[in-house]
Image: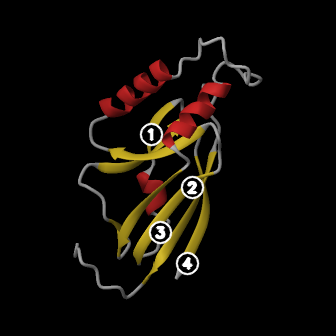
């Protein structure tokens, strides 16, 4: 079975935001692989720690230090000082995440969740494409 759905996220402020629930409410109750792709070049996705909110703040601090907006060498700044820096951060983190699914339940580590990594100062709504490949009657090696 192949399932695919496009969803729109609400606008988020710049930073790292847990969006697991938006994705999980859309996946069918099958066993397989979920692939989530973001259709933007100035925001990204990652799968990481979902319990302590300071992790999200530390991510933002790290990436701002790694790719500072004040760097005058960037040429692609038509949309502002966060233009090229957003593209670089997005390339470093990636445009998709994949994870196993068992009867509609993600097979993650206990403290994992999906982040929208919003790199723009003036954020906009983001579009995700969720694709699930799997079967309804697969017996899992990892019962939940």
Identify the residue shown where x is 59% and y is 11%: 70
The vertical placement of 20 against 94, above or below, is below
Q: Local crowd at mark 4 within 10 Å, few (<14), some, or many (≥20)?
A: few
3 and 4 marks in contact (CB < 8 Å): no
Q: CA distance from mark 2 to mark 4?
A: 15 Å
Give how far across and how far down residue 122 sits, in percent.
Answer: 64, 27
- Count residues near mark 3 (Cα–Cα under 10 Å), then give few for <14, some for 14-19, many for 20+: many
Between 108 and 72, the one lying in front of the other is 72
- Where is residue 41 drawn, in percent x and y? 65, 41
Distance from Cα at disc 3 to Cα at disc 4: 11 Å
Residue drawn 27% across the image and 42% down it: 51
Of 87 and 114, the residue lying toward us: 87
- Please provide percent x and percent y for residue 3: 55, 75
Q: Kindly identify the residue that appears in the image at 59 percent across and 17 percent down.
A: 69
Image height of 101 relative to 120, above or below: below
Residue underneath mark 4 = 2
- Element assignment for label 4: strand
Evaluate whether residue 64 shows in this view.
yes
Tell me which label, 1 or 2, sits earlier in the chain.
1
Q: Earlier in the sequence, mark 1 or mark 4?
A: 4
Judging by the rendered image, the residue that carries numbered circle 2 is 37
Asked whether the residues under the numbered discs 1 and 4 touch, taking CB atoms below 8 Å apart as contact, a structural biologist would say no
Task: Please give the residue where the numbered disc 3 appears in the rendered image.
Answer: 27
């Amino acid at each position: 079975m192949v399932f695919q759905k496009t969803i729109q996220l609400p606008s988020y402020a710049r930073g790292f935001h847990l969006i697991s629930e938006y994705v999980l409410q859309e996946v069918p109750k099958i066993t397989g692989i979920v692939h989530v792709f973001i259709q933007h070049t100035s925001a990204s996705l990652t799968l990481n720690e979902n319990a302590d909110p300071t992790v999200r703040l530390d991510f933002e601090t790290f990436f701002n230090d790694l790719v500072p907006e004040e760097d005058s060498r960037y040429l692609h700044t038509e949309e502002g000082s966060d233009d090229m820096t957003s593209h670089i951060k997005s390339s470093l983190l990636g445009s998709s995440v994949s994870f196993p699914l068992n009867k509609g339940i993600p097979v993650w580590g206990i403290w994992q969740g999906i982040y929208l990594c919003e790199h723009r100062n003036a954020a906009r709504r983001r579009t995700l494409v969720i694709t699930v490949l799997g079967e309804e009657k697969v017996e899992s090696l990892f019962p939940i």
